[in-house]
C-alpha cells in the first residue's frame, strides 16, 4: 500500500487503496474522502459513577 504525504506539512493525504482520478496529466488528483476528527469520541463503558 502506498501512502501519499503532503510535502509542506507532512500530513498523510491518501493511499492507493482508495479510488482517485488523475487530472491534468497526473499533476492534480481528485479524491473522494471524508473528514476525520481524532480524539472527539465519547465512550461510555457502563461503569458506575460516584459523586
Image: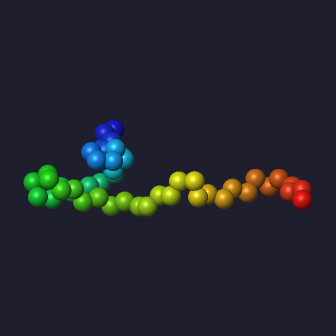
Pick the quarter of the image with the N terminus. Answer: top left
- Left or right, 23 with reference to 1: left
Residue at the outermost left position: 25
The mark tally for this picture is 0
Residue lying farthest to the front in this orientation? 8
Q: Where is residue 12 in the image (x, y as percent from the top left)?
A: 36, 46
Left or right for 18, reference 29: right
Q: Is residue 9 left or right of residue 42?
A: left
The colour scheme is rainbow
For the question of whether residue 5 can be seen, the reply is yes
Task: Name the residue at 50% across, 58% down.
Answer: 37
Pick out the residue farthest to the right. 51
Pick the residue in front: 16 or 28.
Answer: 28
Q: In this view, does 48 lie above or below 2?
A: below
Question: Residue at left 33%, top 61%?
Answer: 32
Hey, which quadrant is residue 7 in on the image?
top left
- Where's residue 43, x and y in %? 69, 56
Q: Where is 3 relative to 48, above or below?
A: above
Q: Position of residue 48 (x, y in %)?
A: 87, 55
Give the residue at x 47% y 58%: 36
Quadrant including the C terminus:
bottom right
Q: Where is residue 41 in the image (x, y as percent from the top left)?
A: 61, 57
Picture layout, residue 11 above or below residue 44: above
Amino acid at each position: 500500500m502506498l501512502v501519499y504525504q503532503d510535502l509542506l506539512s507532512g500530513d498523510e493525504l491518501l493511499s492507493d487503496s482508495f479510488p482517485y482520478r488523475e487530472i491534468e496529466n497526473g499533476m492534480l488528483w481528485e479524491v473522494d474522502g471524508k473528514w476525520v476528527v481524532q480524539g472527539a469520541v465519547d465512550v461510555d463503558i457502563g461503569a458506575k459513577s460516584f459523586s
